[in-house]
Amino acid sequence: ATGDAFGTRFFFTARKEGTIQAVVFIDRDSEGINKELVLFKREFTATADNAAFDPSDADLMNCLGVINIVSWYSFANNKVGIATPGLFYVAPDEMLWCQIVTRGADNIAAGSLPTVFMVVT
């Protein structure tokens, strides 16, 4: 449902500081449901998959920002969601901790798990 964690916590390795120029969400199941990529500079307590996203107040103090993935490009059997935030970050441990929040009711078919990556300068 909207506002639920989509999957589990994960991280990207990154330089200590940079700018996130783009986030790409490969939607192999062709759902095109808007997502939010919530970024933290430190490891945080994950919200269980399909539970209402609920970071603690202490964890939220390490939030770097939220990237909205709302631009979808549809193809015959899949979609690509792209966000271009231009978000500057500082990651003391060279890791960007993340969890995705969905804004709809996803129903991912077996073998169609999405892939997320980002472009950082």
Image (tube, rainbow, N blue to C red):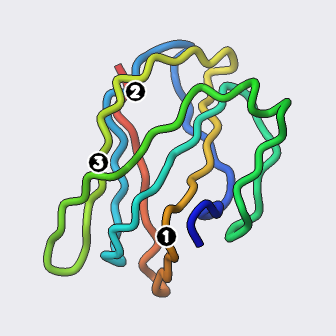
Comparing marks 1 and 2, which lies closer to the viewer?
A: 1
Seen from the viewer's position, the closer of residues 75 and 105 is 105
Residue 53 is drawn in which quadrant? Answer: bottom right
The quarter of the rendered structure image containing the C terminus is: top left
Circle 1 sits on which residue? 104
Q: Position of residue 36 (x, y in %)?
A: 49, 49
Which residue, given by chain and number where applicable, does mark 2 sit on?
A: 20
**Rendered position, 56 above or below 33:** above
Could you tell me the amino acid type at mark 1? Gly
Q: Earlier in the sequence, mark 2 or mark 3?
A: 2
Helix, strand or loop at disc 3? strand
Where residue 59 sits, quadrant-wise, is: top right
Q: Is residue 44 above or below residue 78?
A: above
* Mark identifier at residue 114: none
Q: Is 54 above or below relative to 111?
A: above
The N terminus is located in which quarter?
Answer: bottom right
Spot occupied by residue 19 in the image (x, y as percentages of width and height): 40, 19
Could you say which quadrant of the image residue 87 lies in? top left
Q: Where is residue 35 in the image (x, y as percent from the top left)?
A: 46, 56
Q: Residue at the spot x=55%, y=30% of the render?
A: 65
Q: Which amino acid does label 3 sit on?
A: Ile
1 or 2: tag closer to the N-terminus: 2
Q: Distance between the residues labelled 1 and 2?
A: 25 Å
Give the residue at mark 3.
82
